[in-house]
Image (tube, helix red, strand yellow):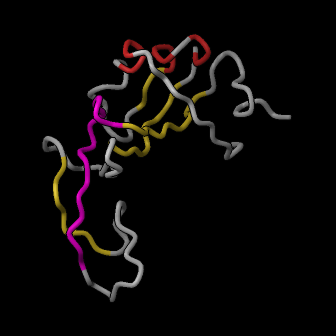
Amino acid sequence: MTRRQKKLGIDDDQKLQALFDKRISQEVNGDALGEEFKGYVFKIMRGCDKQGFPIKQGVLTLGRVHLLLHKGIPCFRGYGRRNGECKSKSVRVCIVSQDLSVLNLVIVKKGDNDLPRLTDTE
């Protein structure tokens, strides 16, 4: 594991169709994202919508919702809060759609060829 990251921009809607209607923690075949990802398997970890609201696992309604969150729960930092103090935060559903601007993927299985500055060990 190299702990490296790489920012990729995919503008082709046909490639992004493979990610739509998937949920957080589901695995996605990399062949649909492009020829360079052939054989790779990715896991969806996090993401944000176009306004910057994070995706929260376990939220299955449409659009955004307001949840009462406390320290220790993902999507809420809780700095400067007393123990047990909660706050209402807006979060996005955990289903991938065209409203997302950022999606974080983790490599689960390495594919046929190396990705430059990501999987090659120099």
Position of residue 116 measured from the top left corner of the image (x, y, whole percent)? 73, 26
The C terminus lies in which quarter of the figure? top right
The part of the image, by quadrant, that contains residue 72 is bottom left
Q: Is residue 1 left or right of residue 54?
A: right
The N terminus lies in which quarter of the figure? top right
Verify whether residue 28 appears in magenta.
no
Position of residue 82 measured from the top left corner of the image (x, y, whole percent)? 33, 89
Determine the residue positioned at 23% across, 58% down: 90
Determine the residue positioned at 37% across, 16% down: 13
Query: Can you say whether 41 is above or below 44 in the image?
Result: above
Position of residue 77 measured from the top left corner of the image (x, y, whole percent)? 40, 70
Position of residue 46 measured from the top left corner of the image (x, y, whole percent)? 41, 46
The part of the image, by quadrant, that contains residue 27 is top left
Toward the right, the furthest residue is 122
Q: Which residues are magenta?
A: 86-100
Verify whether residue 92 appears in magenta.
yes
Determine the residue positioned at 28% across, 31% down: 97
| Residue 43 vs residue 104, the one in the foreground | 104
Query: Can you say whether 116 is above or below 3 in the image?
Result: above
Number of numbered tags placed on the structure image:
0
Query: Can you say whether 54 is above or below 109 in the image?
Result: below
The part of the image, by quadrant, that contains residue 101 is top left
Toward the bottom, the furthest residue is 82
Toward the front, the furthest residue is 51
Determine the residue positioned at 28% across, 34% down: 99
